Image (cartoon, helix red, strand yellow):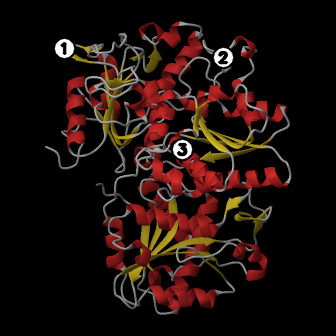
């Protein structure tokens, strides 16, 4: 388990109450701490909100004798890059136990529901369209903190959440009260300040909250719940995952679109884009479970054999009916228009030009775009994608392509971006480092400055990398080793051990099995990333894509090398049959860079890198710094 710096700034309420909401000193002070702690520069609007909102809350506490309560400002939700406005830390007045109140502060003076949807609100004169109801926002934070902070021994008793609209009065936000409140999601306004103060007195005692604050911030963070492990429960009762921020907004947007599709016969496509680990597949599974329980015709589809087979195996365990919810993109060639209520297209960057393959019947070989088939199949088609994960020729799943095809057919399009980071230890910094390293975003490679939420290291040899990852495996973590497609791949034969195709010096290992059954301890191809035994083979991008494991080792082959101050592509070094066919050099370059982006962003706790090219390895060592003795905390 890991420890994290979870807040940018903390003071007692009495200290903060000395700042005036008309002054600028507090916001500037917090901004300095945010820049130092999170390597993030807040904008003027955010600084202005700190100046105006925090003194109000601090004064409220002081007015009822709670000046010793600790205010943890910009508290970072564990394993994500989301931040809570304030967590109030103190002692419970009856039990004396640690007690915490999560506060979402809003400066809104008025707000209304979005098209009578109680989960989404519109705020006049604020950009960005409909926003998640603040009660749902703070409720999600409470659930997530309770799931991951080990020092909360009884989160249901210790944790409460409130949305405090301190500039508004009930009539101006009356719509927001239509959403039922709960113990982890109360709503208060300036008009109900008295009730808010009564609530605070019921949860916090006048004694110092410094100790409670220390315990929350120093608490261990439990390992992230991996998608595959809980997929079965997720589909059945949607109790295993908590959706935060944009995830919840995306979820509610789809439900809203489904309701409109039935009430107004309005067909809508929803595009949900986000980087690795931003929660796309969690949203997809949440939707599948919720919509299925509502009795709506809903299917989940991907273009990835490995991902679909794993979902069928794990989420559909002991349930053939559940297995049938998981399909492939090419299976909708003969589907009638709007045959389903919702089609959830996960990993939509894998959408191909057409669904035609070698077994397609002649009468269906009309060359209809696959995206058009998916758009037609349901009243509400949902596409979840990451444009930087297009790794095969013929894949065309981009936001612009889907939008263009939808609008050409008169389909309304809603687009939501998932900006959060839930893989790679919640480290948005690491994802940016990878994108700049690979030239997928401007600015060029930058040195790795470190992130206590995520470990990046280089390995001197592939055997050293394997040894470190095996330590992680022996310590109870999940770990996998993958590589660029730069070695031949022998045909797997039943009854024969896999051939040691990946050879680097005197080190050799087999690629993951291509077979559909277990063989000599090697799992089937589709289960390499999730089943015991997968560590002993080297995975490729097609078996790693869509999955996550605690520790990831990536071997960079000779198709990506450092020359003359840049990382350049050597297409001739690739052994991928897909790249030996029709792609242009420009297309092949993007696909190879995207391949390494996928491989480098599978790890949740850390990544180890090794390059077969000495000059490239030296370049990586210069960016990353000296190798660690061990990546695993506590290991020798």
Write the residue at 71% across / 11% down: 362
Q: Residue furthest left?
A: 636
Residue 327 place in picture, x, y as percent: 59, 33
Vertical comparison of 446 with 518: above or below: below
Q: CA distance from mark 3 to mark 1?
A: 46 Å
Q: CA distance from mark 2 to mark 1?
A: 43 Å
Write the residue at 38% across / 36% down: 447
Which residue corresponds to mark 3? Answer: 322
Q: Secondary structure at mark 3?
A: helix
Q: Quadrant of the N terminus?
A: bottom left
Write the residue at 68% across / 34% down: 399
Q: Earlier in the sequence, mark 2 or mark 1?
A: 2
Which residue corresponds to mark 1? Answer: 506
Residue 311 place in picture, x, y as percent: 48, 39
Which residue corresponds to mark 2? Answer: 356
Q: Nearer the viewer, mark 2 or mark 1?
A: 2
Can residue 594 be seen here? The reply is yes
User: Which is more toward the observer, 54 or 596?
Assistant: 596
């Amino acid at each position: 388990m890991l420890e994290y710096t979870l807040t940018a700034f903390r003071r007692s309420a009495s200290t903060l109450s000395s700042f005036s909401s008309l002054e600028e000193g507090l916001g500037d002070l917090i901004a300095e701490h945010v820049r130092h702690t999170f390597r993030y520069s807040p904008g003027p609007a955010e600084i202005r909100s700190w100046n105006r909102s925090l003194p109000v809350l601090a004064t409220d506490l002081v007015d009822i004798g709670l000046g010793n309560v600790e205010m943890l400002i910009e508290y970072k939700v564990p394993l994500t890059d989301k931040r809570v406005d304030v967590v109030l830390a103190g002692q419970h007045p009856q039990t004396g136990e640690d007690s915490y109140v999560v506060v979402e502060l809003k400066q809104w003076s008025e707000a209304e529901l979005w098209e009578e949807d109680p989960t989404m609100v519109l705020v006049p004169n604020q950009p960005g369209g409909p926003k998640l109801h603040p009660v749902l926002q703070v409720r999600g934070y409470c659930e997530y903190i309770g799931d991951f902070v080990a020092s909360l021994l009884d989160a249901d008793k210790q944790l409460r959440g409130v949305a405090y609209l301190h500039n508004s009065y009930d009539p101006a936000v009356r719509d927001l009260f239509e959403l039922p409140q709960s113990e982890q999601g109360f709503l208060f306004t300036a008009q109900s300040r008295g009730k808010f103060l009564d609530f605070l007195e019921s949860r916090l005692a006048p004694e110092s909250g410094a100790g409670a604050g220390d315990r929350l911030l120093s608490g261990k963070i439990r390992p992230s719940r991996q998608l595959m492990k809980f997929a079965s429960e997720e589909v059945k009762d949607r109790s295993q995952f908590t959706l935060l921020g944009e995830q919840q907004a995306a979820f509610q947007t789809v439900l809203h679109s489904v309701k409109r599709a039935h009430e107004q016969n309005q067909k809508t496509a929803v595009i949900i884009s986000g980087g690795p680990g931003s929660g796309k597949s969690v949203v997809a599974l949440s939707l599948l479970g919720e919509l299925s329980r509502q009795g709506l015709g809903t299917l989940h589809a991907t273009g990835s054999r490995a991902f679909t087979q794993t979902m069928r195996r794990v989420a559909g365990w002991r349930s053939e009916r559940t297995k049938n919810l998981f399909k492939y993109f090419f299976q909708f060639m003969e589907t009638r228009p709007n045959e389903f209520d919702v089609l959830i297209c996960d990993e939509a960057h894998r959408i191909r030009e057409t669904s035609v393959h070698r077994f397609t019947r002649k009468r269906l070989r009309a060359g209809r775009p696959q995206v058009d088939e998916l758009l037609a199949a349901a009243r509400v088609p949902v596409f979840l994608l990451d444009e930087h994960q297009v790794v095969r020729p013929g894949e065309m799943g981009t936001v612009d392509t889907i939008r263009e095809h939808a609008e050409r057919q008169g389909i309304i399009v809603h687009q939501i971006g998932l900006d959060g980071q839930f893989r790679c230890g919640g480290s948005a910094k690491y994802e940016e480092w990878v994108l700049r390293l690979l030239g997928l975003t401007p600015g060029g490679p930058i040195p790795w400055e470190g992130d206590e939420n995520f470990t990046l290291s280089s390995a001197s040899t592939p055997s050293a990398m394997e040894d470190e990852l095996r330590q992680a495996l022996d310590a109870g973590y999940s770990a996998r080793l993958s590589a660029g497609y730069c070695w031949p791949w022998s045909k797997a034969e039943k009854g024969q051990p896999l051939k040691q195709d990946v050879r680097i010096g005197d080190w050799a290992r087999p690629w993951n099995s291509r077979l559909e059954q277990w063989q000599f301890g090697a799992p089937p191809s589709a289960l390499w990333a999730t089943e015991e035994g997968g560590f002993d083979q080297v995975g490729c991008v097609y078996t790693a894509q869509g999955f996550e494991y605690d520790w990831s080792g990536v071997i960079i082959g000779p198709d990506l090398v450092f020359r003359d101050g840049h990382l350049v592509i050597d297409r001739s070094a690739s052994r991928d049959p897909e790249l030996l066919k029709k792609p242009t050099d420009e297309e092949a370059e993007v696909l190879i860079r995207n391949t390494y982006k996928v491989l480098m962003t599978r790890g949740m706790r850390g990544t180890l890198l090794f390059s077969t090219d000495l000059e490239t390895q030296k370049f990586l060592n210069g960016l990353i710094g000296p190798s660690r003795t061990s990546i695993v905390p506590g290991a020798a």
